[in-house]
Amino acid sequence: MANTKTDVSPALSSRRHSGSCSILVLFISGIGMLLLVLILRSLLGDPVEAKGCRMSYMRPSYVHYSEFDTEHTRFASKYKLFLYREQGIDDEHKLHGIPVLFIPGNAGSYKQVRPIAAETATYYHDTLRHDGRSIDSGTRNLDFFTVDFNEDITAFHGQTLLDQAEYLNEAIRYILSLYSDPERVGRDPQLPDPTSVIILGHSMGGVVARTMLIQPNYQANSINTIITMSAPHSRPPVTFDGQIVQIYDEVNKYWRRAYAQKWASDNPLWHVTLISIAGGTLDTVVPSDYASVESIIPETHGFTVFTTGIPTVWTSMDHQAILWCDQFRKVVAKSLYDIVNVYRASQTKSRADRMRLFRRRFLPGLEDTSEKNIALRDGASVLNLDHKSSRTVPAGDRVVLNRLGSQGHTMVHLIPIPTADVSIGKRFSLLTDVLLLDSDESNPLDILVCVLFDQPGSMTARDSNHMYVASSPSRLACKNVASDAILLPASTRQTREPFFLEGENAIHPFSYLQYEVDDLLEYNFIAVVEKASSRPSGFVIAEFSDQEAIQKTIPVSLIQIVVFGLSISLGPDRAMAIDLRLPALTSSLFAFDVKLLNSECETRRQLFTAMVRQHLNRPYESKYFVNVTDCIPREYAR
């Protein structure tokens, strides 16, 4: 049999190879087009978080310290130091207050100090300087210094970061020396000269601030308070320069090693507090996860918080808006005045007091570790009662009051506090749309905790003439608990977001009180004091709830939720505030739609609508959703 040899021509082989390449190209192109469509769908179709910042206004001026020259620093020809002055408020040249240094971020401008510095000047000028209690406690205005880095790129160049840190340490040394010069200072000469400067850093400026403390020219104890905004503490935003990665490693190791020391005397950072504030999902420049400091410092010295959870802010903000956002800058300004004390050389309160005040100002207040002022025994007043102007609420009943003050006279509603033998796991909750104040006679509502006045060991009355109701046989010693009130965004049929925008009607927040019964065992009653009013308005809801009614853990897997969804039914007798815990939903890679359905369509009697708080602890991230209930006809309810 003859063998037949078949030759494949080069042209045919080339066509087959070309055909296979065409299929591969089409396949890859198809995948690329599909990904592009999905990206566009995500950008255009998925809801974008609303921007809630209101604009800020200021009248800036700057004083250049040309004397801070090459005799003080080798970077004098490259960088400049300025003092911010608010026109019409601040003395142009004299230093009257407490030094604060603003550090701009990557390619940032020294003028970015304007919004916060202007707010601090205005707040002190209009409010604090007229408050004798604040002045006596050591509050003074703030002298804001800022540095011009010529918009250097610190995120991409490690040596630039080190140069800035070195320059700033010399700048602090120079700033502190200014307060020893009588010609430059208008302060009381009896006050101690400042030995430290408060640091405010934006973006990479926050990283530079932490780097300053490990530099050879750092002056010990010249920094004890650092507040950073959108700063990438945990890792560098880009890794083009290997030196940046090395600097991050060195700085974070130093801070971790310092706080790992057993004794305070061995910790060079013992008196340093660090508050890291993240802008949330709208910040597309620095991922907010990078702002976390939980792995770097202990909770006793600092924390990370998202702007969406800060009381009265309640909105995410982009990388630049965090500097000028009006409601946020107001909180920052107040927090700075909270912690200053001009009578101490450090110009600030103790570390423990600073942390307590920062938590009070920046955290939502619903944390398990939230500190209560209810334990303080001072400030008691006598409350006299009679049967016409007071009532005792039956044990276990919910108090619901509407149109406060409509009765024409002061009315006291006494809620008995459960005794120790029946109080295990109970919680007291109160919600009102009235702003609770410590000492305001015009306020339509007071919330007090009381003991029988003639009971052994009861509180001593500070003012026996301070009586809400006419004389009667029953007397209570009471303490106002307004200082423990937690602000929550208002949730009504008219609200759409937790915030209001410029030009819109102001939305006044709700006040919320929450106590574990263990906090109340030394008291007998909670008194809801409803004062007479010519214009009745407002509501109050208060109750004691059992632990099993207020906290529910749903043991369901992620696969079950993805495949079948999840439906949770809450009965009509549910607690006012419920904590639903879903351990399976811990991944940030999944997004879920949540709907709250109400079988009761009649809303005319509704005092408030449902509100959802989605939150994480450490870092402290809270996100509020208001007016989220959808009404469904009763015949479709299950």
Image (spheres, rainbow, N blue to C red):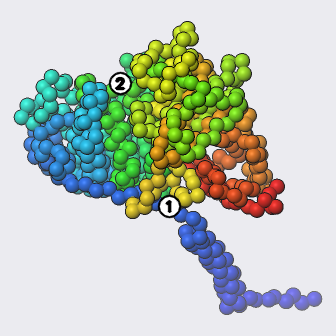
Please provide percent x and percent y for residue 195.
23, 28
Please provide percent x and percent y for residue 544.
66, 32
Residue 350: mark: 2
Residue 609 is at least partly visible in this image: yes
Please provide percent x and percent y for residue 349.
33, 26
Q: In the image, what residue occupies the spot 55% across and 59% down?
A: 494
Q: What kind of element bears circle 2?
A: loop
The local crowd at label 1, few if under 14, some if 14 to 19, many if 20 or more residues have their Cα within 10 Å, is few
In the drawing, does residue 95 fall left or right of residue 607?
left
- Amino acid at the residue labelled 2: Ser
Q: In the displayed structure, would residue 344 be above or below residue 541?
A: above
Residue 154 is at least partly visible in this image: no
Q: What kind of element bears circle 1?
A: loop
In the drawing, does residue 511 fall left or right of residue 16?
left
Q: How far apart are the two marked residues, 1 and 2, measured between alpha carbons?
A: 38 Å
- Amino acid at the residue labelled 1: Ala
Q: In the image, what residue occupies the spot 70% across and 34% down?
A: 397
- Residue at the top extreme, as displayed: 456
Q: Quadrant of the N terminus?
A: bottom right
Quarter of the image for residue 340 reads: top left
Please provide percent x and percent y for residue 336.
33, 37
Q: In the image, what residue occupies the spot 60% across and 74% down?
A: 37
Residue 50: mark: 1
In the drawing, does residue 403 fall left or right of residue 121?
right
Q: Quadrant of the C terminus?
A: bottom right
The local crowd at label 2, few if under 14, some if 14 to 19, many if 20 or more residues have their Cα within 10 Å, is some
In the drawing, does residue 261 fall left or right of residue 491?
left
Q: In the image, what residue occupies the spot 9% across and 31% down?
A: 181
Q: In the displayed structure, would residue 184 be above or below residue 307?
A: above
